[in-house]
Image: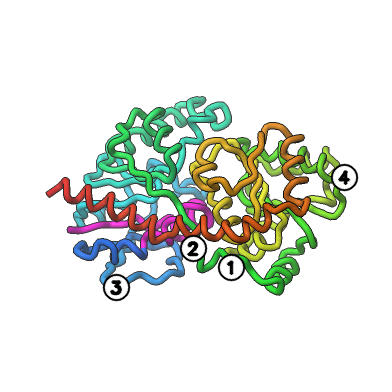
């Protein structure tokens, strides 16, 4: 039987997938699947106009290079992408096509298996203006139809599974939770020498709290900024580092305004995007990861921080506890005073640091890419078995 994998999300320049969680999931799962389902023939499908990702394809993989979607103002639109893969898929005639994002999947395509990571726009409709325009309404309807017509839905948390069933009326029976993971060969506690190199490369302060991720409203960055403003009134030797491609995001000016309003311009560092090779050292050098999100499909930075032996301050909202277990310092992230109190605790020389150094890597190891890929393979095999 034939299995096609949509690999475009691993290619730099295809939307923003490659440098986000989707890119990591593709790289964690795709190379392992052929070994886990050896009786099937695999096809990796790439956009021929974009650079191929760095990782090496396993043996017995046929690589297909297809056209991209039509570009409008430099961007590939959702509707045009519906026509990008169809010619090649008609030639291959796969029994299963795995799409690593439902936004890249095809409507009415036989054998579709789609990843749906979260339902953030539906949980916060006022922030994403889902139905504020005809375009938004059509896009919502298209995504819903794609998912409902899929033969199998994969997601990364029980919380996301519940939300998918709730908002899209999908039967839980066709939704499989496969979780997410970190590569513990990359994410582990780094040496003091490596930490110092990373500080020099990104001009990081000697002591700092770390935030990694986006700054859209549900990330709740304003509460973290306010909390840090409270914290620094009593602690003078720690900065806050906000890492990521923040300047590209619509909320960047609002972020700068919040920093200035709280008189934190000299206490908040914005190093930009941290290369994956350097990120473990940046985690390792921080006092704690501050992750005040109101909703996550999983919360990959939490698991990355724990793998590096770094404490995490976060909430018990959405899927976050599925990532952190009992190793995070939980607080009410809507209350800046409570976040500031948690910052005090993680810098007070408590036993938390030692516990995370010992137990954090073990937590990450239980959510390995081998386990995730095995979960995906098992779900696909069950689907193939039902077809025969």
User: Mark 1 or mark 2, which is nearer to you?
Assistant: 2
The percent position of residue 313, horizontal first and vertical second, equals 66, 45
Answer few, some or many: residues within 10 Å of disc 3's Cα (few below 14, many 20 plus, some between 14 and 19).
few
Work out whether 265 lies above or below 167: below
Q: CA distance from mark 1 to mark 2?
A: 12 Å
Which residue, as the protein is rendered here, is positioned at the far front? Answer: 351
Mark 2 and mark 4 lie on one chain; the one further toward the N terminus is 2
Which labelled disc corresponds to residue 168? none
* Dot 2 and dot 3 residues touching (CB under 8 Å): no
* Dot 3 and dot 4 residues touching (CB under 8 Å): no
Residue sitting at x 16%, y 46%: 386
Mark 2 and mark 3 lie on one chain; the one further toward the N terminus is 3
The percent position of residue 138, horizontal first and vertical second, equals 40, 30
From the image, tell me which residue sits under label 2.
183
From the image, tell me which residue sits under label 1.
277
Q: Secondary structure at mark 2?
A: loop
Residue 257 belongs to the span the image colors magenta: no
The percent position of residue 337, horizontal first and vertical second, equals 76, 35
Residue sitting at x 38%, y 36%: 143
In what quadrant of the picture does the N terminus appear? bottom left
- Dividing the picture into quadrants, the one containing residue 283 is bottom right
Evaluate whether residue 297 shows in this view.
yes
From the image, tell me which residue sits under label 4.
234
Mark 3 and mark 4 lie on one chain; the one further toward the N terminus is 3
Range drawn in magenta: 1-30
Q: Secondary structure at mark 4?
A: loop
From the image, tell me which residue sits under label 3.
59
Q: CA distance from mark 2 to mark 3?
A: 22 Å
């Amino acid at each position: 039987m034939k299995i096609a994998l949509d690999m475009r999300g691993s290619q730099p320049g295809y939307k923003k997938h490659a440098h986000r969680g989707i890119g990591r999931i593709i790289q964690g799962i795709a190379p392992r699947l052929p070994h886990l389902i050896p009786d099937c023939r695999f096809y990796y499908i790439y956009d021929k106009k974009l650079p191929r990702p760095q990782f090496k394809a396993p043996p017995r993989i046929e690589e297909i290079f297809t056209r991209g979607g039509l570009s409008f103002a430099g961007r590939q639109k959702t509707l045009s992408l519906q026509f990008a893969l169809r010619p090649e898929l008609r030639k291959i005639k796969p029994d299963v096509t795995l799409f690593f994002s439902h936004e890249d999947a095809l409507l009415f395509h036989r054998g579709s298996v789609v990843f749906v990571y979260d339902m953030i726009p539906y949980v916060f409709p006022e922030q994403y203006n889902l139905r504020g325009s005809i375009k938004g309404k059509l896009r919502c309807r298209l995504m819903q139809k794609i998912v409902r017509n899929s033969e199998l839905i994969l997601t990364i948390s029980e919380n996301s599974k519940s939300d998918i069933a709730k908002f899209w009326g999908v039967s839980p029976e066709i939704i499989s939770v496969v979780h997410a993971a970190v590569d513990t060969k990359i994410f582990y506690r780094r040496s003091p020498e490596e930490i110092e190199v990373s500080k020099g490369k990104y001009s990081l302060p000697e002591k700092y709290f770390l935030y990694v991720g986006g700054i859209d409203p549900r990330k709740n960055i304003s509460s973290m900024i306010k909390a840090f403003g409270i914290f620094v009134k009593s602690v003078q030797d720690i900065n806050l580092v906000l890492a990521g491609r923040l300047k590209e995001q619509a909320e960047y000016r609002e972020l700068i305004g919040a920093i200035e309003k709280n008189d934190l311009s000299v206490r908040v560092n914005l190093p930009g995007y941290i290369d994956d090779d350097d990120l473990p050292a940046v985690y390792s050098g921080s006092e704690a990861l501050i992750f005040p999100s109101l909703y996550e499909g999983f919360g990959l930075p939490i698991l990355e921080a724990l793998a590096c032996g770094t404490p995490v301050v976060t909430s018990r909202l959405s899927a976050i506890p599925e990532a952190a277990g009992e190793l995070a310092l939980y607080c009410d992230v809507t209350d800046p005073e409570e976040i500031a109190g948690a910052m005090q605790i993680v810098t007070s020389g408590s036993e938390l640091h030692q516990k995370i150094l010992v137990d954090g890597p073990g937590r990450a190891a239980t959510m390995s890419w081998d386990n995730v890929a095995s979960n995906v393979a098992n779900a696909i095999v069950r689907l193939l078995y039902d077809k025969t």
